[in-house]
Amino acid sequence: MPRLFEPTTAGQIQLSNRVVMAPLTRNRAPNAVPTALTTTYYQQRASAGLLITEATAISHQGQGYSDVPGLYGTDQLDAWKHVTDAVHAEGGKIVVQLWHVGRVSHTELQPEGGKPVAPSAITAKTKTVLIKDGVPTFVDTSEPRALKAEELPGIVHSYTVAARNAVDTAGFDGVEIHGANGYLLDQFLKTGSNQRTDDYGGSIENRARLLLEVTRSIVDAIGGGKTGIRLSPVTPANDVHDADPQPLFTYVVKQLASLNLAYIHIIEGATGGPREIAERPFDYAALRAAYREAGGKGAWMVNNGYDLALARDALQDGADLVAFGKPFISNPDLVARLQQGGPFNTTDKNTIYGGGAEGYTDYLTLGAQS
Ligand SMILES: Cc1cc2nc3c(=O)[nH]c(=O)nc-3n(C[C@H](O)[C@H](O)[C@H](O)COP(=O)(O)O)c2cc1C
């Protein structure tokens, strides 16, 4: 049985253990540029086998929240290079989560105050965060406009440029394509948000087309061994739902199988909520089996509500990596704490989004507390 604290690989990335830090948006990047605090934050967490950064916009159009970072300007790439250098100096590995929010945005965050873009002009019943005078406020997302088919190659291009710059300029070990949580690629996948009648809507093949075009293009640019993807088959996050997710995601992972990806990252259940949703049943073991039967060799990463016991069970059942989200906010040395069975710091809920060092870089390690 694979062991949580033993080294492994995900594609071309060598990991010192199977504990992964899940992507966590922290809204501490004014003007979409990470700061020196961001460098400290990730460096403190470098004992994870793999760090996945907070979601990072591939373009201005891909932005959906105040003070989240981007990857489309030289100042952003320079700032991320400080982060990756610091993580590598600690012996850690780090990939960046590539993000286009689609309709989960607000006109105030879009180029020239335009409408956010989406597969179809259907407003998401969800909120985004605007930070005014340092105070985060939740606001309704704006009504989107449907993307024209001729705009889609430009979006594939933005993803690809971001991936290449992430590896070549910013020094990341790879990228994670954000295909989860109701953002652009997930909006295209699912029937509730995609009512297109062209080659990108209707059938499963059509709804999966954009996600697969993005993935293939990134793989061509940086190699499958440095490319991971995150999927959330049944999450209700950001108002997404699909009429029949099992065949949809089975098709997606079968298509991904031939791309030699570093890993497939699956959120089980409702992101940050119940792992089982009665009205949205899903067979994750069957999904992994479909990927393996189609020849998929990437590491299988699981997430959502894991603790040490659940993580060990998951490895026994065939998962390769376990991603922890919330526990990493207040436990920079989560690996050491899991290894010795705790104790774990509690999280201050008031300092999760926005602000400075407090609740970000001031959680102590076990060594500092003893
Ligand atoms: C503060 C916070 C920010 C998050 N930001 C992201 C994000 O940027 N990208 C993403 O894919 N998921 C994001 N998530 C979801 C987490 O990656 C993870 O799926 C979720 O917290 C469940 O895992 P956990 O039970 O280990 O926390 C976020 C969750 C939290 C609590």
Image (tube, helix red, strand yellow):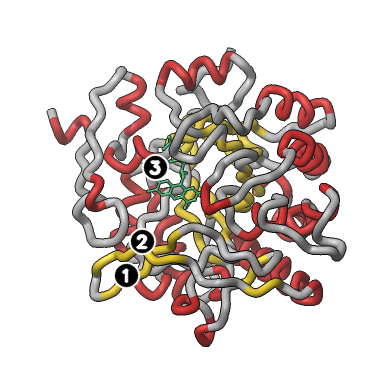
Quadrant, the C terminus: top left
Residue 213 position, x and y percent, is 79, 58
Disc 2 and disc 1: Cα gap in Å? Answer: 9 Å
Q: Which residue is mark 3?
A: 46
* Above or below: residue 97 compared with residue 285: below
Helix, strand or loop for disc 3? loop
Q: Which residue is mark 2?
A: 27
Residue 203 position, x and y percent, is 85, 50
Q: How would you rate the neighbour count of disc 1 (Cα within 10 Å): few for under 14, some for 14-19, many for 20 or more? A: some
* Amino acid type of the residue tagged 2 in the rendering: Asn
Residue 77 seen in the figure: no
* Above or below: residue 355 compared with residue 309: below
Residue 259 position, x and y percent, is 79, 44
* Amino acid type of the residue tagged 1 in the rendering: Ile
Who is closer to the viewer here, 200 or 12? 200
**Of the residues under marks 2 and 1, which one precedes in the sequence?**
2
Kindly check if marks 1 and 3 are in contact, taking CB atoms under 8 A apart as contact.
no
Q: Which of pointers 2 and 1 indicates the residue nearer the eye?
A: 1
* Above or below: residue 131 compared with residue 16: below
> In which quarter of the view is residue 215 placed?
bottom right
Who is closer to the viewer here, 347 or 342? 347
Residue 317 relative to residue 198: left or right: left
**Of the residues under marks 2 and 3, which one precedes in the sequence?**
2
Residue 221 seen in the figure: yes
Who is closer to the viewer here, 181 or 99? 181
Q: Which residue is mark 1?
A: 131
**Of the residues under marks 1 and 3, which one precedes in the sequence?**
3
Kindly check if marks 2 and 1 are in contact, taking CB atoms under 8 A apart as contact.
yes
